[in-house]
Image (cartoon, grey):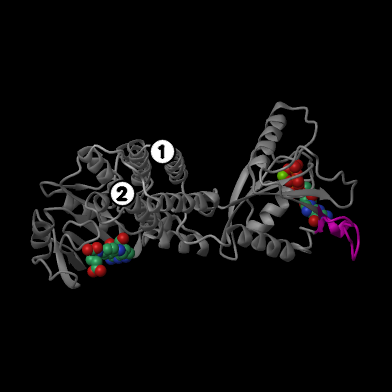
Amino acid sequence: MDNRTGTIFALSSGALPSAIAVVRLSGPRVRFVLETMAGIVPEPRRAMLRALKDPRDGAVLDEAVVLFFEGPASATGEDVAEFHVHGGRAVVGAVLEALGSFEGVRPAEAGEFSRRAFDNGKLDLTRVEGLADLIAAETEAQRRQALSQLCGSFGDLVEGWRRRLIGLRARIEAGLDFAEEEDVLASVTDADRAVLSDLRIGIETKLGEGRSGERLRDGLQVALMGPPNAGKSSLMNALAKRDVAIVTEEAGTTRDVLEVHLDLSGYPVMLIDTAGLREAEGIVEREGIRRALARGSDADLVLWMEDASGRRTGVPDGVVSAAGTVWPIANKADLVGDGFDAGDDALAISVKTGAGLDRLQEKLAAFAGEKFAGLGSAMATRERHRAALTACRDALVRAEAVGDAELMAEELRHAGDALGRITGRIDVEDVLDVIFAEFCIGK
Ligand SMILES: Nc1nc2c(c(=O)[nH]1)N(C=O)[C@@H](CNc1ccc(C(=O)N[C@@H](CCC(=O)O)C(=O)O)cc1)CN2
Ligand SMILES: Nc1nc2c(ncn2[C@@H]2O[C@H](COP(=O)(O)OP(=O)(O)OP(=O)(O)O)[C@@H](O)[C@H]2O)c(=O)[nH]1
Ligand SMILES: [Mg+2]
């Protein structure tokens, strides 16, 4: 984004046609556009019904609800206007074209409204990320987490730590100046050390939550693995309630890794179907098996599925997920007869008759619930958060180890800067474009 000034506009609502479409504008020319097209600048935050006119010939384009938000009390911090128009393609097309005809007014790029909100101090980076997650949220747990991040739970926690660090550093540096004047050695008080270790513990606790926050965004990874023809793809389709994967009676049907997102009692799960494992002849199938093993070793949970009517070998040693959780499943219970008991700890199901599927779904939802339980609402949801927290923790550990007040102050500065990168208070020009590019146009 090179041109960060000017007045921008975009269709901020969804796909057309729709009942109503919202066209949003932000920037210094908003008042002029309102006067020209709606004949008035409405009182801030009061909806008005107006005829929208083409600035070039005065032709009426639509009858619209018009809103004005006076900067800085707006979503972007600039003057903002909204035209709530009828959501027809031609209506929206005509309004957008009319807006583009104004001097100094241009279409917005993806994420540009949010970028302005960030630049004007309306949202810190964690809130911006929460906003992106809220728009992407597909399940209740994701919505709650994203909304809490948008409202600042994580950003305020990090900013609180940063302020305490700054306070600590200020006290230590004041001591340094004093020592210089008085020609004595600066010392760090026990109280200062207590604050330091308290901060370190807080950050370590947050780091101890691991990737749970990231998993909440992407979904818990559950990989379907097992020998060919066990019914993995059939189960995938049954749980997804649509025909995602090809199912045939031929062994070796699935080659690529397939993913579907499931909503299990509000928890996000990414179900991964993989190629059946066997000594394969063809290179395509061998590559499929290589991918299957790779995904399985990354998964939070592996469902190891075998055919209950055949000879079951059990879970091979090689198939142990990173989290180490593997559930054996015996499918095709219908072929074995009524009251089939898998015997071992395997869960007996039949995708064909649906037997055992409810139980499996309940178990999966409980597993997801357990994985996400105990997480506060303020959580690190991205790799970059954890990287910065780790850098901060390392600097704090070094600060605790040094005896010299000057070196300690220096480490505290590093620690504070690491936290500042999370909220975007310092030195993050490089990550901004990445974060804002995630957004749709009009946001
Ligand atoms: N019509 C409409 N609906 C919408 C939005 C919008 O922009 N327009 N939003 C877009 O994301 C969300 C609401 N977010 C908003 C965030 C801040 C402000 C705003 O005017 N903030 C001012 C005043 C705050 C106040 O009065 O409490 C400010 O922060 O100073 C408006 C909407 C969801 N619904
Ligand atoms: N009788 C019976 N047949 C089933 C059941 N589940 C799946 N099948 C059948 O088993 C065959 C193989 O099913 P798939 O879902 O393609 O098996 P897969 O494990 O994905 O196989 P690969 O992709 O080759 O590894 C198909 O003909 C299915 O209709 C079941 O519960 N009972
Ligand atoms: Mg398959």
195 to 282, vertically: above or below: below
Type of amino acid at the residue the image marks with label 2: Ile
* Label 2: element kind: helix
- Residue 15 sits inside the magenta stretch: no
**The quarter of the picture showing ligand 1:** bottom left
Q: Which residue is mark 1?
A: 403
Residue closer to the observer: 81 or 327: 327
* Label 1: element kind: loop
Type of amino acid at the residue the image marks with label 1: Gly
Question: Label 1: how many residues lie within 10 Å, few (<14), some (14-19) or many (20+)?
Answer: few
Question: Label 2: how many residues lie within 10 Å, few (<14), some (14-19) or many (20+)?
Answer: some
Q: Position of residue 255 (x, y in %)?
A: 68, 37
Q: Horizontal placement of 285 versus 19: left or right?
A: right
Residue at (18, 64) in percent of width and height: 69
Residue closer to the observer: 236 or 389: 389
- Residue 333 sits inside the magenta stretch: yes
Q: Which residue is mark 2?
A: 166
Q: Horizontal placement of 363 versus 426: left or right?
A: right
Residue at (83, 56) in percent of width and height: 345
Q: Which residues are magenta?
A: 330-348
Q: Horizontal placement of 215 versus 233: left or right?
A: left
Q: Position of residue 319 (x, y in %)?
A: 74, 40
Q: Main secondary structure of the magenta part?
A: loop
Q: Quadrant of the C terminus?
A: bottom left
Judge whether residue 83 can be spotted in this image.
no
Residue at (41, 56) in percent of width and height: 154
